[in-house]
Amino acid sequence: GNSVTQMEGPVTLSEEAFLTINCTYTATGYPSLFWYVQYPGEGLQLLLKATKADDKGSNKGFEATYRKETTSFHLEKGSVQVSDSAVYFCALLSTSGTYKYIFGTGTRLKVLA
Amino acid sequence: KAGVTQTPRYLIKTRGQQVTLSCSPISGHRSVSWYQQTPGQGLQFLFEYFSETQRNKGNFPGRFSGRQFSNSRSEMNVSTLELGDSALYLCASSSDPSSTDTQYFGPGTRLTVL
């Protein structure tokens, strides 16, 4: 079946450090891939998405590239800020069979000033 | 355009009671999905409704049920509450996942079962 695996957190970084949060997936067909972010006390917000191989999603300085050959969609940011502290979820939407989102377990990021 | 709204935001119940949560999707969205989020299990899919029909269902007991109305608003019901049902319940809407459209989440309803 479809699944998403994220690196475990928490991840603690200093401000302006480089961020990578790994995400790999297992899916049949050609799923769409997403990164969502959840700030304390809030629901999930879409951060970026990619719908086909080699697409790069980007938003607010975050980037992720859909790599079909490695079934990965790693999230990166060149210089994190304290305000980026949140939980990040990788997700896929299978476009074959049942259309259902599958979420990773989430990675908590803490950025220190 | 207004976002996804969920009511109530917080709820405290005791074991054995039942509860109903409500979700109003973004205007024009016909798909509503429900998720349970807990620290131990992460985000788990409950069910998805599209045009008043349950289209997908996760692996939850029959105590968890839902429905969708003709205006796309959705309700989720949990009967005979257990302590383990304490969680953040998130609702998300999209125009139709089959078009790879994005899901938009509400702020959630935090349910505490005592």
Image (spheres, coloured by chain):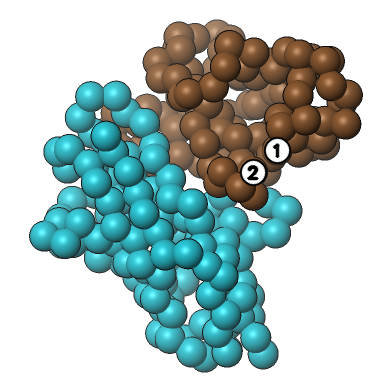
Chain colours: A cyan, B brown
Where does residue B3 sit, x and y in percent of width and height?
Answer: 61, 40
Q: Residue at x 55, y 84 (%)?
A: A13
Q: Quadrant of residue A49?
A: bottom left
Where does residue A108 sit, x and y in percent of width and height?
Answer: 57, 65
From the image, tell me which residue sits under label 2: B38
Answer yes or no: is residue A2 visible: yes
Residue kind at label 2, given as amino acid type: Thr
Chain under disc 1: B
**Who comes first in sequence, dot 1 or dot 2?**
2
From the image, tell me which residue sits under label 1: B87
Q: Nearer the viewer, residue A89 or A46?
A: A89
Q: For the residue carrying disc 2, how many other residues have a C-alpha within 10 Å: few (<14), some (14-19), or many (20+)?
A: some
Residue kind at label 1, given as amino acid type: Ala
In the image, residue B14 above or below residue B66: below
Screen quadrant of the C terminus of chain B: top right
In the image, A75: left or right of B89?
A: left
Q: Residue at x 45, y 33 (%)?
A: B94
Whole-angstrom CA distance, mark 1 to mark 2, is 5 Å
In the image, A43: left or right of A70?
A: right
- Asked if the residue under mark 2 is in contact with the one under mark 1, i.e. CB atoms within 8 Å, the reply is yes
